[in-house]
Image: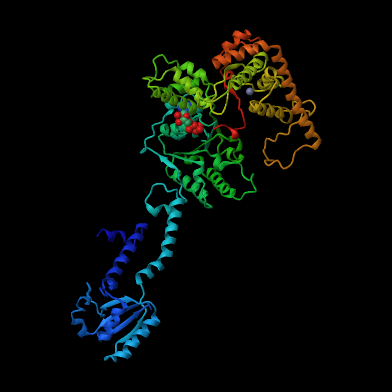
Amino acid sequence: MTNKKKINPKKPKFSPYWIYGIIIAVFLTMQLFSGSNFQDASPTTPSQFMSYLRNGDVEKVEIVNRREAKVYLTAAAEQTEIHKKSKPSSLLPSATRLPNYKFEFGDLQNFEDDISKVINEENLDPLPKVEYKTEQNLWGDFLIGLLPFILLIGVWIFIMRRMSGGAGGGGGSQIFNIGKSKAKLFDENTEVKTTFKDVAGLEGAKEEVQEIVDFLKNPEKYTSLGGKIPKGALLVGSPGTGKTLLAKAVAGEAQVPFFSLSGSDFVEMFVGVGASRVRDLFKQAKEKSPAIIFIDEIDAIGRARGKNAMSGSNDERENTLNQLLTEMDGFGTNTNVIVLAATNRADILDKALMRAGRFDRQIFVDLPDVRERKEIFEVHLRPLKKAKDLDVDFLAKQTPGFSGADIANVCNEAALIAARQGKKAVDKQDFLDAVDRIVGGLEKKNKIMSVAEKKAIAFHEAGHATVSWMLEHAAPLVKVTIVPRGRSLGAAWYLPEERLIVHPEQMLDEMCAALGGRAAEKVIFDRISTGALSDLEKVTKQARAMVTIYGLSEKVGNLTYYDSSGQNEYGFTKPYSEKTAELIDKEISDIIEEQYQRAIKLLEENRDKLTLLAEVLLEKEVIFKDNLEKIFGKRPFEKKEMVEDKKAEEKVEIIEEKKKLDNTEEE
Ligand code: ADP
Ligand code: ZN
């Protein structure tokens, strides 16, 4: 029987189904051997029994558990017509005699009294015996006894399943894998389709990882000259810039075993598991070397140690990190295992991780520029059915500041929009709609807005546009809209220059432009609104930074309260005196007030143009740079077209207007 194999004691393989099996087996056995279930004692009533007793038919009465009576008839009575049917039968031959009748009496005392009364009255011979017995319900008792164990085992199995993540694998065997690494292994048997071709742009980063692949493929080439192969490389960059993609491509290209996991895979609710998983991971990798280990989101474990001394939960993470460091130190350069890790928060990583000999290479994965965006578009346009005249250059220009993931999203969204409208191919307009949607959320065509509100928003936006047009250092405008989207009621898009250092007048001009919205409301309606919340937030932050961080305020002086080491995380103590605090507050509000007055003055001088612009905006809802040029003429300080300077063009900044605070928003 197959059963025999399973129970083979040499290889005990635990399965929760065994428990069910055992329970069923026990149940059946009980059914078969207890016999009691097959007794067929006829039911009767106490009064009937009394009449049998009077007749002298009863040989014995068994009182079971003080509640039930079992009646045994005399041999003679059993033959009579009335009792014939009561003859007990059993499927199994039973050694003990079986009762003929059974019934439940109410009160034992009364019942005994009744019996002795009948016996005394009738002078019966032979005297019927009365016996007392306690019968146990074996099956029920057994079950009750078993229940705690079943519960315990059930809970245990449940916890074990939970602990090991419930992923695949056979039944309870996961229990033994808790300390094993959860890395996914890609080797020659698993097909990884991603190659460097799928990664558009990122030339520099690609080159560096390619070099790593090369290290693993031809280590002698490098070591013969005495060089050491790096142990790790850290991919650093904003989310969605293609770090994971790059690592996948490495797996596809390297043709060496590739272990992929996320930093959070080490973390478990049990102490020591993380460290043991790290150990296991490195052991596996060494066995398969040359190999690559890829740890995504390494900040989950690699965060600087010992900062949150207050919470004990950290210890586990620290242990894990320590183990990782030890392992990285432990394997020599000749083991041919290279660790790749990705993070978007290189600043919070523990310094020890970046030390030479660990992740000694940092590969920066930047947001793509126009040319790279075009390449990324081309990658993601491949599977789409696009209109013939689709201009990819145009798309790339329309998406400054987008990451690779954003672009992938735009392409997908555009296809969905086109499909919704029943088009045969995805065209330019679909892409533009997709861009708008991704930037600002879903367009709310039916958002209810009164005419007065709409007018206020138009003037507010026109105020931003006018002020930024008039100021030399303010960012040039790209687009202004008063179409409500998501939570914002309107938006002005700017194209800030990428500056490495910023001068105070530039900051002040930007603040003035940001205050232009509220200033316009004040100038036109002589009434301000809550619509400037995000403007004020931005301006306040900037002014505070000028005073307390960059040392740009004359009164406070050339000092900074910025702490790059982030030691004073909780800010228990202010690093300055109360008096300085007052001075700082005063400076901040002075700076902001000055710029506000400047914006008001500017707008008052250009009131006619502002009004004109707002009217155009009300009519068209969306306006571009050209419309502004028509009203204001060419911008006086327009920089010479930024030729060839690819870095200058980046990042559109969007200034949104929020009507109220987020949490009091509509719907
Ligand atoms: P990260 O790990 O940096 O957060 P991912 O690598 O997960 O970002 O990128 C998410 C998606 O964005 C990828 O699956 C890919 O579709 C797209 N993507 C990002 N960068 C690029 C790129 N350079 N070329 C092509 N696609 C990209
Ligand atoms: Zn505004």
Residue 478: horizontal and vertical position, in percent?
57, 17
Residue 506, position as x, y percentages in the image: 69, 20
**Residue 590 falls in image quadrant:** top right
- Report the label total: 0
- Residue 590 higher or lower than 607, as above or below: below
User: Which residue is located at x 71 percent, y 19 percent?
Assistant: 505
Of 605 and 566, nearer the camera is: 605
Relative depth, front residue between 326 and 192: 192
Closer to the camera in the image, 17 or 602 = 602
Judge left or right: residue 157 versus residue 51. Answer: right
Compared across the picture, whether 438 is left or right of 74 comes to right
Whether residue 317 is visible: yes
Residue 76: where, in percent of width, then height?
Answer: 20, 85
**Going by the picture, which residue comes out furthest to the right?**
579
Q: Would you say residue 206 is visible in this rendering?
A: no
Query: How are the colours assigned in the image?
Result: rainbow
Quarter of the picture holding the N terminus: bottom left
Quadrant in which residue 363 is drawn? top right
Relative to 572, is 99 above or below?
below
Residue 68 location in percent, x, y?
A: 34, 77
| 540 on left or right of 225 | right
Q: Give 226 or 209, whichever is nearer the viewer.
A: 209
Please report the residue visible at 63 percent of the width from the left and 18 percent of the height from the top. Answer: 459
Which residue corresponds to the image point at 48% horizontal and 28% vertical from the top-left?
A: 405
Classify the position of the C terminus by image quarter. Answer: top right
